Amino acid sequence: MNESMLLWSVLFGGIGLGFFSYGRKQKAVVPLVTGMVLMIYPYFVPSVTVLVIVGILLVLLPYFIR
């Protein structure tokens, strides 16, 4: 794991924690699940490019699915 992978993982994990907290407080399923996925998926992604693309798509997901 290199530095950029670590920094992107921390960034998307922090955003995921925010989504998770919001989803739990508001009892909303989409932000809750998106937050859990954002916190877990960096462990399984092999490259930085895939990490960033999937992360951006997951961050945008709750805005399109309500």
Image: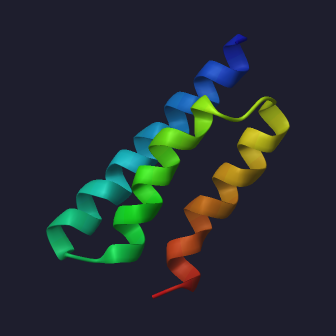
Determine the residue located farthest toward the left in the rendered image.
25
Q: What residue appears at the point 39 percent right and 68 percent down from the top-left corner? A: 31
Residue at 24% x, 56% y: name it: 21
Q: In the image, residue 44 lies at what x, y percent?
A: 65, 34
- Viewer-proximal residue, 46 or 11? 46
Q: Would you place residue 4 above or below residue 65 in this image?
A: above
Give the left or right position of residue 6, taking residue 37 as reference: right
Q: Is residue 36 above or below residue 42?
A: below
Q: Residue at x 73, y 11 (%)?
A: 2
Farthest front residue in view: 44
Q: State the quadrant of the N terminus.
A: top right
Split into 4 quadrants, where in the image is the C terminus?
bottom left
Specify how the rendered protein is coloured. Answer: rainbow
x and y percentages locating residue 15 in the rendered image: 44, 48
Q: Residue at x 50, y 74 (%)?
A: 62
Measuring from the top left, give residue 10's x and y in whole percent: 50, 29
Provide residue 41's location: percent of width, then percent of height: 58, 42
Q: Quadrant of residue 19?
A: bottom left
Quadrant location of residue 3? top right
How many numbered marks does the figure carry? Answer: 0
Residue positioned most to the top: 2
Q: Quick check: 60 left or right of 18?
A: right
When the figure is inspected, residue 66 is found, relative to residue 58, above or below; the finding is below
- Taking 41 as reference, is 48 left or right? right
